[in-house]
Amino acid sequence: MNNQSAVRLSGVNKNYPHFSLSDVDLDVARGSIMGLIGPNGAGKSTALRIMMGLVRPDSGTVNVLGREIPSEQVAAKWRIGFASEDMPLYQPATLEWHMAFMQGLYADWDSAYADILVQRFDLRKDQKIKGMSHGQRVKSGLLLVLARRPQLLLLDEPTTGLDPVARREVLNELMDVLADEDRTILFSSHNTKDVEQLSDTITFIDRGRIIASQDKEIFIENWRRIRFEPPEGFKLPALAGTTESHLNGRLANMVTRRFGPQVTQALQENGATVHAVERLTLEEIFVAEVMGSREGDNT
Amino acid sequence: MNQEFLLSQSDGRPMYQQIMEQIKWRITAMEWNPGFRLPSIRELAVSARVSVITVKRAYQELENEGVIFTQQGKGSFVAEVDGLGIRLQEKELELKLADVLETARSQGLDMDELIRRLRDLAAAQKRGN
Amino acid sequence: MTNKTINRPGFGVIAWRLAVKDFWLIRWPLVGYAAMGALALLFISINHPLTFHAGLVLMVSALAVVGAHLVFASMMHERTNQTLPFLLSLPISYLQYTWSKLLFTIGTFSLFWLALVLGIFAVVNTRDFLLAGMLPYDMIVLTYLALAFVLTLTVGMMTESLAWTIVIMSICNIGISLFMITMTKFPGLGEFLGEPEAVWNTTAIGILAIEVILIVALVGLTILVQSRKTDFL
């Protein structure tokens, strides 16, 4: 068993009437941050819930912090913090009540840090959950897991629906988790900017399938948009990895997922003048990957 | 580390390059001198609020360029090269000049034309002040 | 910081904490029911046939309502609020969860029940106009209510169906009046109601014993069935 993995999914399948998670393989290295990006309904929440033992997969193995899920899930959960906007707290109770509840359960609850988080997240301890806005509820849920300093944080859309200030605060706290190289974060989001900044590894998921999973820097390095000026009668050379191309007279561009000097070379050899080679944002890469994958589904 | 590493996401360049640049500035400004021990990858990641892998990349590229060197288990250090700061400055100017030359060439300017343009530009800036 | 040396609360502590959580969440209604019970005892201790009967009705209602609320609370706390995912994110086993529900419902009900039993004994023994002869009858009625509660709880926990729970609860509640009337006329029991001293004859003891045996059997059955279920899903 690879004890360098904080989370390991192998061949996980889960079938619902209108959606299926198919053949999911995922490996999150200890001490790293993985961002899980996907459109709504892609299966991010389901994947996270399977890791927590909240959902039983139909097949495949799930291993979290060296423990088999679901058979050893209680042992694993002592060191896992799970937060999801889809996980309501007790409405008639206050934040303080929840904090006391957690403190009574977890020996590693840091109440000094919890109080600091209340300040930072601009929350009120005596406020009832049912009186809170969406953002406050999300922050409360995060606070309740962060103050335990768990070894693994599984966060389902931790910044979704938060105002920019709140987002910044949450990201700051997540960064501090990083300082401990023994702690791991797996978070799902459709905010590619957050993922791009924080993550070591990025996994794209769409329609229940993992489309790609790699170190962020590799993604950023492999994808390029090339702007060039083609001569008359230019034909785009066949290059492995080209995902799209637009030839509009003098302004042409192409996008490739396998950039290398051979690409610009091939263009130049065919008479084109290369004007610019640009990196793509994570958002553009994500959209391109998803489109590419869906096209593959449709052919 | 009392200096902040400030990175911008809206800056067009990848974050690892921004980190590299800011490290080079510190070397040029003589805040970080040859032999100085760089913060650990993780420390810098936390303080700059970026992922560990981005800092790792920056350190690797800097090592490839000979600006820093890494000792297994001890950390990374500014390269023990005399006048490293000045060398970096020169390198930076060289790169920018190469860029200008390339652009000029692609626009079909010859050397005299280019020099004349530079002089005009300098004069205009002086007038502007 | 190593992971193995952290102190983890034991099985019982966690079950207890969860039970306390459930208790705390309905604390105000419980205060209300306690007030009802206290009022019932107060009425019974007033020397007037009307208040006496009102007191009895109130006492029976209080216990019935507490039982109903506890059963629903135990079933509904996680269901309606959808806080089940929250609980599942905690390191608690299904067994701890089940035991916490049992502790919460049976424990809380027992407190009320005991309070009422002690209350009625105290009131009867300190008021001259109240005849101790009614004590066996009262005990049988109160124990019937405990039986009704446990039956409803068992059905609720085993079927996890709101519909069935309501059906059973309704049957039991309708049965209360019938039971009470039947008992006042029951040979070996009814005729001693007006006695100044409590008559604990074989009839009275026998009925009580049957009730208690049924209660114990039902609780045992619930525990058995619940321990078989291995997980929440």
Image (spheres, helix red, strand yellow):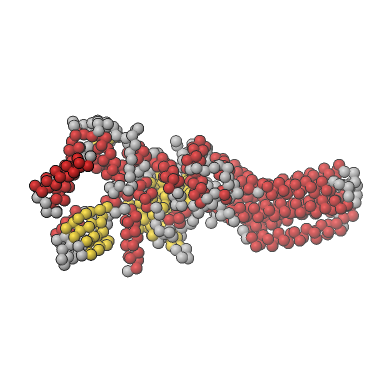
- Relative to C117, is A226 on the left or the right? left
Residue drawn 78% across the image and 58% down it: C176
Residue drawn 37% across the image and 50% down it: A193
Residue A122 appears at what percent x and percent y? 50, 42
- Relative to C152, is A12 on the left or the right? left
Q: Is residue A277 above or below residue C11?
A: below
Q: Can I make out residue C182 in this image? A: yes
Residue A206 appears at what percent x and percent y? 38, 60
Q: Quadrant of residue A273?
A: bottom left
Who is closer to the viewer here, A74 or A246? A246
Residue A1 appears at what percent x and percent y? 39, 47
Q: Quadrant of the N terminus of chain B?
A: top left
Who is closer to the viewer here, A118 or A37? A118
Q: Quadrant of residue C10?
A: top right
Who is closer to the viewer here, C17 or B86? B86
Residue drawn 52% across the image and 43% down it: A123
Residue A266 appears at what percent x and percent y? 17, 59
